[in-house]
Image (cartoon, grey):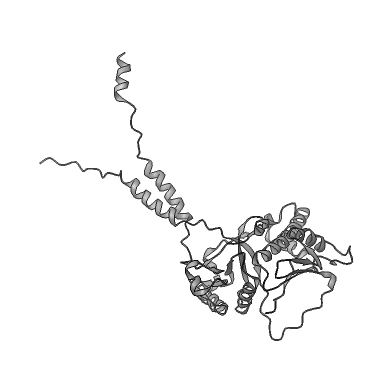
Amino acid sequence: MGKFSKKKEGGTPAISTASLPDIVFMLLFFFMVATVMRENGEKKVTVKMPSADQVKKIEKKGLVSYIYVGTPIKKYQAKYGTAPRIQLNDAFADVKEVGPFVLAERAAKRDEEKPLMITSIKADKDVGMGIITDIKEELRKVNALKVNYSTKKGSVEANND
Amino acid sequence: MAKRKLEEINAGSMADIAFLLLIFFLVTTTMESNYGIRRKLPPPPAADQPPPPVIKKKNVLEININGQDQMLIEGELAQDKDVKPIAIKFITNNGRDPQMSDNPQKAVVSIKHSRETSYKKYISVYNELLAAYNEIRNKYAMQKFGKPFDQLTEEQQKEVKDAYPQKIAESTPKR
């Protein structure tokens, strides 16, 4: 009897929370590693990427220059209209500025990295090919021949919805 | 005076601090998918470039896409899903059908599109074409080396690529 009552008095001991910081830190490190600080600041165009399944992953993110193409977001529609526009860094740009932009990106890299550079075109799935063709022509002019058409991973049938 | 025992710092708030950081990173994280179709553009035309070699019509698979996203393959209306089987048949023809390519090295796929063609249609067609090439290359790699294309060494991959080169020609639409 004595033994029984003693246990009741003590109650269940509180669970130690000493390892809680460790667990939280673990999660913290995961997210720190997985986080990519948005490389281009503010996005001024809406980009809904098309889907494709014959895709490759970009490994060296540091060597990629991004070109965004899409309709301006609501905020800028009054000023720029709803026609698809090009965004370089965080400003709207003309097709003519694509070449200098790529050259500037290239100048900032080390010599041995220069041939590995990739230009990634992140275009909305509904933009016309005209603007894409113009960008491609500009890229050819500055010899930036490695191009990546950014897509989601998925079947192409999703493009028709 | 008695020596005071050094008190331990309370680590109870450590979790709070870590949580704070954790939430910050949770919010800023964008799990960006960085996938895409990789292409190499043709180099810019040189001034003294010789005229392009004449390619026999049967060695060219013509894909035409108009401004309404309708596609003609060799003059016949086709859908996205038709591209892959047609391309495979065309590339691996090896002279069997006199209307199709002589051999894979000579087979050229030509894509023509207008300025109004949508980007998604272009990507869809391109993707299907690449799927055709990848399937052919994988099949060849399995036959020859017993491994899928991705797992081959660089030299082996080059051999497969030489056997089935990707020749995709794109023309620039007129303004």
Q: Position of residue B12 (x, y in %)?
A: 30, 43
Question: Horizontally, is B117 left or right of A117 in the view?
Answer: right
Specify the quadrant that holds the N terminus of chain B. Answer: top left
Image height check: is B25 above or below B10? below
- What is the residue that sits farthest to the left in this orientation? B1
Q: Position of residue B57 (x, y in %)?
A: 84, 73
- Depth check, front residue: B166 or B148: B166
Q: Position of residue A72 (x, y in %)?
A: 52, 69
Q: Can residue A65 be seen in this snapshot?
A: no
- What is the residue that sits farthest to the bottom in this orientation? B48
Question: Horizontally, is B102 left or right of A119 in the view?
Answer: right
- Depth check, front residue: A122 or A131: A131
Q: Residue at x 72, y 83 (%)?
A: B49
Question: Horizontally, is B25 left or right of A92 in the view?
Answer: left
Quadrant assignment, res B77: bottom right
Specify the quadrant that holds the C terminus of chain B. Answer: bottom right
- What is the residue that sits farthest to the top in this orientation? A1
- Depth check, front residue: A4 or A88: A88
